[in-house]
Image (tube, rainbow, N blue to C red):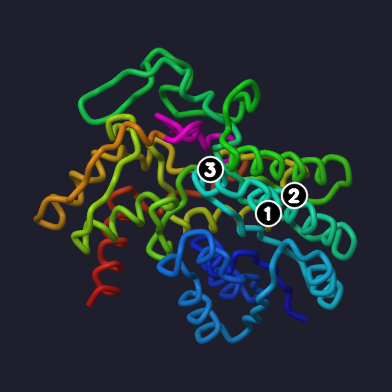
């Protein structure tokens, strides 16, 4: 019998990449996605197009339009496939700072409570399975903003004599005594529960605290997916608003395919249950908002229509964030990046142009 992988958020950026990857590795794929992203961000952010592609291109893909907050539906799904489930990749989430503040109850139910329900289904029906959780660097709240930052011409940078300067922020960064945003708190609660199910119950859980996860499959929206939405606006010559920090805020960007390669590494050789890894573009792939805009202007041959609104700087957002991925690379030395920031932007521009022609 083929192994089965349950992948939540199957129509999303990372979920769809994981579906295709593990299907190619011989898994039966059970995809869970009820297009909640369209509810969060509107019809243009819908993931239905991606689900349709998965259904048409993957012969062993089985889709379930389940709300992950529905424990009874999850329990039935897990119990009916318990004999073959070897992997759970939990990508589904409400991913926006701003949206979370508008509906805190929904945000917490989707991000935190639903994660607990998935963990309990795993413990109850397939305690031997590997459970991978896509967490976020927002668990560190705004603590990174209190690092010694220096303003340069096109970006903020960390003081060169700080211990995080060479390789970025590692897992020693505190998650306490800071402002997280409502979204950050719900994801932190989920992150801690995934750790606890590993440490307390021995479930083989792994947590990836992602920087900016991106790629051409991202259904970017103004409130989430900055690089995808920026590229979309630039290609379509639509106005784009940068939220605060002079547009010099820095994000490390990792291609979804590179992240899913990391999933494969931990599935083959799981670490100690409850292990946490920072995972992002690191010093290998990072960019500021202004730098991304200038790159796109050079690539496209026209000016991007953008404004910087200092009044809308997001509370709890990061001014500078670069992930230190050395812990993961030390544990899994065969893993490597296949995409630079230039590769990512090139691919996204090409994909966006295809969609608009």
How would you rate the neighbour count of disc 3 (Cα within 10 Å): few for under 14, some for 14-19, many for 20 or more?
many
- The residue furthest front is 102
Q: Residue at x 77, y 66 (%)?
A: 70
Q: Are marks 1 and 3 in contact (CB under 8 Å)?
A: no
List the residue tagged with mark 1.
132
How would you rate the neighbour count of disc 1 (Cα within 10 Å): few for under 14, some for 14-19, many for 20 or more?
many
In the picture, residue 312 is in which quadrant?
Answer: top left
Coordinates of residue 256 in the picture (x, y in percent): 47, 57
- The residue furthest top is 161
Q: Which residues are magenta?
A: 314-329
List the residue tagged with mark 3.
279
From this view, report whether residue 251 is shown above or below residue 121: above
Task: Please tell me whether mark 1 sits on a helix, a strand or a loop.
Answer: strand
Coordinates of residue 200 in the picture (x, y in percent): 87, 41
Q: Residue at x 36, y 42 (%)?
A: 285
Q: Disc 2 and disc 1: Cα gap in Å?
A: 6 Å
Left or right, residue 307 beside residue 157: left
Front one among 114 and 192: 114
Left or right, residue 196 beside residue 54: right
Q: Residue at x 55, y 69 (%)?
A: 21
Front one among 141 and 323: 141
List the residue tagged with mark 2.
205
Coordinates of residue 1 in the picture (x, y in percent): 78, 81
Task: Please tell me whether mark 2 sits on a helix, a strand or a loop.
Answer: strand
């Amino acid at each position: 019998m083929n192994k089965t992988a349950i992948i939540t958020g199957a129509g999303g950026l990372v979920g769809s990449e994981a579906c295709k990857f593990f299907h190619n590795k011989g898994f039966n794929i059970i995809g869970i996605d009820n297009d909640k992203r369209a509810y969060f961000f509107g019809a243009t952010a819908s993931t239905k197009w991606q689900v349709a592609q998965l259904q048409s291109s993957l012969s062993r893909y089985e889709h379930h339009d389940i709300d992950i907050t529905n424990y009874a539906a999850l329990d039935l799904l897990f119990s009916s496939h318990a004999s073959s489930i070897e992997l759970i990749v939990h990508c589904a989430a409400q991913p926006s700072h701003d949206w979370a503040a508008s509906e805190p109850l929904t945000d917490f139910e989707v991000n935190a409570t639903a994660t607990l329900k998935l963990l309990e289904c795993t413990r109850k029906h397939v305690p031997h399975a590997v459970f991978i959780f896509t967490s976020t660097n927002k668990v560190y709240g705004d603590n990174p903003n209190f690092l010694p930052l220096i303003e340069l011409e096109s970006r903020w940078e960390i003081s060169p004599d700080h211990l995080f300067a060479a390789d970025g922020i590692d897992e020693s960064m505190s998650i306490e005594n800071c402002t997280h945003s409502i979204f950050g708190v719900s994801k932190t609660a989920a992150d801690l529960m995934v750790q606890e199910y590993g440490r307390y119950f021995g479930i083989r859980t792994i947590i990836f605290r992602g920087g900016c996860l991106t790629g051409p499959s991202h259904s970017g929206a103004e409130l989430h997916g900055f690089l995808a939405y920026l590229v979309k606006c630039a290609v379509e010559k639509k106005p784009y608003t940068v939220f605060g920090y002079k547009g010099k805020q820095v994000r490390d960007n990792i291609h979804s395919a590179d992240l899913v390669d990391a999933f494969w590494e931990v599935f083959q050789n799981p670490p100690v249950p409850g292990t946490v890894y920072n995972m992002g573009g690191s010093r290998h792939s990072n960019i500021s908002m202004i730098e991304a805009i200038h790159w796109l202007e050079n690539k496209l041959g026209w000016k991007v229509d953008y404004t910087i609104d200092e009044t809308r700087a997001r509370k709890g957002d990061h001014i500078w964030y670069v992930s230190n991925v050395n812990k993961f690379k030390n544990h899994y030395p065969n893993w490597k990046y296949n995409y630079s920031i230039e590769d990512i932007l090139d691919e996204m521009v090409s994909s966006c142009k295809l969609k608009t022609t």
